[in-house]
């Protein structure tokens, strides 16, 4: 085998191609820590904001779907970059991989600018459509600041894909940890000490995201020790490279934006069958769900690069090994997390209901946390299976699977139970559970059949 890599960067790439289990573990652990830290400081945002009252928490909750759009686009572009660049690395085409990394960053900048303008224009109409009600001032204050800095949120999330493409998930972890620490420090300062209230939470989030970009650019352009070299001197426009990034990045962004669409519609349903307090419960409880399911998403994210590299090298048996192994460890983790979350739901709830203005949501939040964990084990197989399709460049298939899960099955069961059967808010919670269980098992069968076809091709 031609030795075209150097030092630890060479080792990362060779492990992806030679030992998919080891590569998956090596990449997943830093990713789990990174995503946990990210979820943690979003959770800490909610803890500090809850001190302003349930209405402030609900206001942030109504903006959360739009924030998810930004994160979704960033992660989607990161997934597209990871797929394309990992594939080129698997094909042993270093020049094309370097050129592709520059393409990725340019695409990220262009998309960020367009999205910032678009979301600022539609913010107020969307909030009103969601049933924001008396919390509109909180939602507008928070939303205008966060969306004005969309480029920081999108770029910070999407740049990680370039590192993942070469098998390096450790340095993004360091950047995210430092960013989280900064956010944790700034939140109380901006919200309470400077008396900026909910605006302070938004400002702290943007400063932290900008800090991530500075760190990642330092490694790219000052230290210059990454395997991939996203320098303008390596750039030559190539339509096929752009299409490779977009064909996974665009559908991946849409499938995550679809999650935001689901959150918006679901919040509207909750406001209809319950109240804005139910929206506060959902937005807060979903932050706990995000933390609980972070290991599953991290393993799936690592799976994209491992599968893409082996897909480029035509090592299809390794794709099967990586898929099965990712599901195995994900199921074990999901069961442990589900049991712990259910057992300690009352204690978790007290963190978000410590103020007199937010204590009224405590019983409903506890109930949400105890019921929602039922679907975790099926998510373990669903996530891994969806990310298989991103890893082989079938972004549209992965997108359709997500739409099937969120928009079709989950909303169907939610409307059926919460509105038609008149089970109210509890019916909405169970709609999520049933929708996830059905769709995740369909996705598993779909992925298994596709991998078998690849091996037998």
Image (spheres, rainbow, N blue to C red):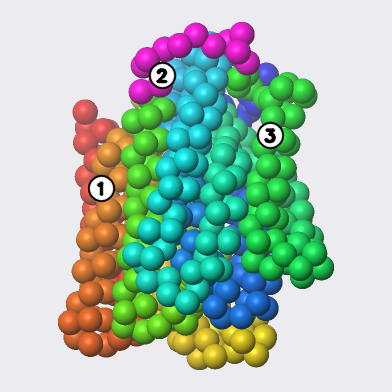
Q: Position of residue 305 (x, y in %)?
A: 48, 35
Q: Position of residue 103 (x, y in %)?
A: 49, 21
What is the C-alpha distance between the residues marked 1 and 3?
A: 32 Å
Q: Main secondary structure of the magenta part?
A: helix
Upstream in sequence: badge 3 or badge 2? 3
The structure residue drawn at horizontal position 64% and vertical position 22%, both measured from the top left corner, is 227
User: Residue 414 got which mark?
Assistant: none
Q: Position of residue 393 (x, y in %)?
A: 34, 32
Upstream in sequence: badge 1 or badge 3? 3
The reply, left or right, for residue 437 in relation to residue 191 is left
User: Residue 400 got which mark?
Assistant: 1
Question: Dot 2 corresponds to which residue?
Answer: 241
The reply, left or right, for residue 349 in relation to residue 402 is right
Q: Position of residue 401 (x, y in %)?
A: 27, 51
Q: How many residues crowd mark 2 within 10 Å: few (<14), some (14–19), many (20+)?
A: many
Question: Dot 3 corresponds to which residue?
Answer: 216
The structure residue drawn at horizontal position 63% and vertical position 16%, both measured from the top left corner, is 231
Write down the region rendered in magenta. Answer: 231-243
Upstream in sequence: badge 2 or badge 1? 2
The structure residue drawn at horizontal position 67% and vertical position 85%, both measured from the top left corner, is 354
What is the C-alpha distance between the residues marked 3 and 2?
A: 22 Å
What is the C-alpha distance between the residues marked 2 and 1?
A: 23 Å
- The answer to whether 115 is drawn above or below residue 84 in the figure is below
Q: Secondary structure at mark 1?
A: helix
């Amino acid at each position: 085998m031609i030795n075209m890599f150097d030092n630890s960067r060479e080792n990362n790439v060779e492990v992806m191609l030679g030992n998919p289990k080891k590569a998956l573990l090596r990449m997943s652990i830093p990713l789990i820590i990174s995503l946990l830290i990210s979820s943690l400081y979003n959770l800490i945002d909610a803890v500090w904001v809850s001190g302003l009252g349930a209405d402030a928490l609900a206001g942030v909750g109504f903006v959360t779907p739009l924030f998810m759009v930004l994160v979704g686009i960033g992660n989607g572009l990161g997934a597209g970059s990871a797929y394309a660049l990992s594939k080129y690395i698997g094909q042993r085409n270093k020049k094309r991989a370097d050129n592709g990394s520059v393409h990725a960053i340019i695409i990220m900048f262009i998309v960020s600018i367009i999205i910032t303008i678009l979301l600022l224009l539609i913010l107020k109409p969307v909030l009103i459509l969601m049933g924001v009600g008396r919390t509109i001032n909180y939602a507008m204050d928070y939303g205008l600041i966060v969306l004005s800095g969309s480029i920081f949120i999108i770029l910070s999330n999407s740049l990680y894909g370039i590192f993942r493409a070469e098998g390096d998930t450790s340095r993004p972890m360091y950047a995210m940890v430092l960013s989280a620490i900064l956010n944790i420090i700034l939140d109380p300062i901006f919200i309470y000490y400077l008396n900026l209230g909910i605006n302070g939470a938004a400002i702290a989030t943007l400063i932290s995201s900008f800090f991530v970009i500075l760190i990642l650019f330092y490694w790219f352009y000052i230290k210059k020790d990454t395997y991939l070299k996203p320098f303008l001197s390596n750039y030559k426009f190539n339509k096929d490279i752009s299409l490779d990034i977009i064909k996974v990045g665009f559908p991946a962004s849409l499938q995550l934006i679809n999650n935001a669409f689901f959150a918006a519609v679901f919040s509207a349903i909750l406001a209809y069958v319950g109240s804005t307090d139910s929206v506060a419960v959902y937005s807060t409880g979903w932050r706990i769900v995000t933390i609980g399911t972070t290991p599953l998403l991290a393993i799936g994210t690592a799976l994209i690069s491992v599968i893409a590299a082996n897909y480029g090298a035509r090592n299809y048996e390794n794709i099967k090994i990586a898929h099965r192994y990712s599901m195995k460890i994900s199921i074990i983790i999901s069961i442990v997390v589900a049991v712990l979350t259910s057992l300690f739901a009352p204690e978790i709830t007290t963190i978000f209901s410590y103020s007199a203005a937010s204590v009224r949501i405590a019983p409903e939040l506890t109930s949400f946390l105890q019921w929602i964990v039922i679907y975790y084990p099926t998510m373990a197989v669903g996530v891994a299976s969806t990310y298989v399709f991103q890893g082989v460049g079938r972004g549209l298939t992965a997108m359709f699977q997500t739409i099937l899960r969120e928009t079709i099955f989950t909303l169907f069961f939610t409307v059926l139970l919460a509105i038609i059967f008149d089970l109210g808010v509890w019916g909405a919670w169970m709609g999520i559970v049933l929708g996830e269980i059905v769709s995740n098992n369909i996705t598993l069968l779909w992925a298994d059949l596709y991998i078998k076809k690849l091996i037998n091709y």
